[in-house]
Image (cartoon, rainbow, N blue to C red):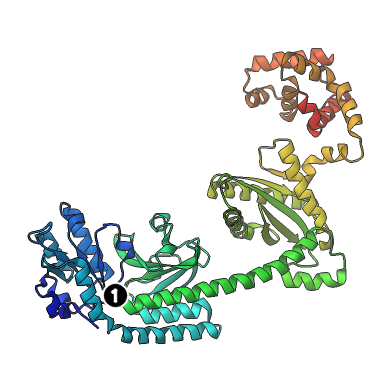
Amino acid sequence: MLTVKDLLQIKSIEGIKIVAGEKGINKKVSIVNIMENPDTFDWLTSNELLLSTGYIFKDNVDLQNRIIKELAEINCSGLCIKMKRYFDEIPQNMIDLANQYDFPLLELPFEYTLSQVISIINEKAAGAYDLLNRKSLDMHNKLFRISLEGGGIDEISSELAKIINNPILFLDRDWNLLHHVDLEDNKLPLTDYFSLEKGRTVFSKEFTDSIPLNINEFKKAIKRNYQTNGAEIKCRILPVAVSDYIYGYIVVWQTVSELTELDYIVLMDASRMMALERIKARDIEEIKLKIRQDFFDDLLTGKITSNDNIQTLCDLHGLKSDYMYYCIVLDIHSKILTKNDDMIAHKYKLENIARKCVNFIYEVSRKVNGDITSFYRNNRVIILVGKNDFTPSKAKEEAKIFANELHSLFSKEISDTTFLIGIGSQYKTITTLHKSFSEAHEAIRLMKQFDNNTGIAHFEDYSVYHLLGSNIKSHELEDFFMKSLGKVYEHDKLHGTAYLTTLESYFQRNHNLSETAKTLFLHRNTLIYRIEKIKEILSTDLKNAEELLQIQLALKIYRLLPNLQQTK
């Protein structure tokens, strides 16, 4: 293959001379490119010779130094500067740094055009590609055979690490770890810098945010330095993508060897192989998920009634047919979902949030007395909690404690998102689990209707509403309300007061004036005045037990009938 030393012998470009970095004179040259933009580092590869007039860095010492350092770290062949245009001589700081990195720094005589030099060198380098192509084909066949024989990303990753002689990490599109391979020769082991747990984020957000959003357009590995504990470690990041969709990333932990041009070719080949593996794995997972979804859909809608089949199906999908289950449903509303999102982007964002919730649920589930199964449907996460004993009251108490812990965790860890958690009752048989599921949904509906700001409710918390809404006609409920609280209701409409809300809060706070005043942001004396006015309007002292029951039922009806609030 053509080297920097060979360039100096080409008669058609006589006059090129090396002024620094002579120890790197045997660096290989595979391609020649022009560099007149300081933002091109992400587009460069190993063994590239860069030509420049020097215009972009003629008055910037920091950029001069950065260019030498970056090109040396990318393992470019050298930098050739055309003289007498912007430089009479190459700056000493660039010469010193090039010598430090053994990076060839060359002078190109003024009479040559950059395009002319590119043409001459590329012609000379063309013959060297045959050998490179044969080697890259051998590597391709090796990786392809692994994929063909079902080796998957684990074996492809292991073979790739051997070929390029560097540790690698394979991450999904959210930068969560899928697989990693370290090498014995690595003096900076991955385990010293990362918690290598599958499915968890490896790199810091600061690091991942430095990766261009359009990295899939680069079609090659870009360089980033990972800084931690005072160390700066060179990494090469290559997207695993098909068209515009990124399936993951290959990160080379470049701590053992410099990457050669062949290594970059192999990396791109491996990227394509891994993309196919991810597509294959996704298709298989979608089939499994569809079968699982069909089972749970049938179970939670009451379509499975046969006790003969239920045990086999439960064993297949991780449930225990002899356990007593109750259902918890998590309703998700996120501000990051915008109207401008297309259908795929919207679905992906929602799935990402739901997936995080499921992961958190399984983390917390270790503290729960019961068998946990969790999955998601659109913007709802479903949790099935199974116990080997039937204790409804205890199950309700435990469920609320569990739900409170989840709600606090979600609110802390997932920003710009609100959560409502509905809990259903425990049932004796798994074939009646659909009742608990329906109850959990109903608890969420009532929370929304009644503006419950706690975010958590059990179906039984609304027992009175269930009773009132079961077999009593709406006009009968409205008649009861008007007979009990109609005078207060009409007073509010006529005078713009808020006596109904005041009365409701007064009962919710167990007649505690201080707590009620604090909740309504009122002075205590103002609240006392309101209560006295209510007593006057209703002609009651709010002490008779029968009257109190009627008033409380009327307040429940007020919340149950939207038309009363609409005409408020």
Q: Quadrant of the N terminus?
A: bottom left
Is residue 106 found left or right of 389 in the rendered image? left
| SS at mark 1 in the image | loop
Q: Is any atom of residue 381 visible in this view? A: yes
- 533 in relation to 439, above or below: above
Q: Within 10 angstroms of label 1, few (less than 14), some, or many (20 or more) residues?
A: some
Give the residue drawn at x 79%, y 44%. Answer: 460
- 447 in relation to 345, above or below: above
Give the residue drawn at x 9%, y 73%. Answer: 15
- Residue 163: image location, x then y, percent: 38, 82
The one of 55 and 174 positioned closer to us in this rendering: 55
- 238 in relation to 526, above or below: below
Is residue 53 found left or right of 263 in the rendered image? left
Report the amino acid beneath label 1: Glu
- Residue 144: image location, x then y, percent: 49, 83
In which quadrant of the rendered view does residue 364 lie?
A: bottom right
In which quadrant of the rendered view does residue 388 lie?
A: bottom right
Give the residue drawn at x 40%, y 75%. Answer: 267
Q: Is any atom of residue 78 visible in this view? A: no
In the picture of the structure, the residue carrying the numbered disc 1 is: 258
- Residue 154: image location, x then y, percent: 50, 77
Can you name the residue that lies furthest to the left here?
88
The one of 351 and 399 positioned closer to us in this rendering: 351
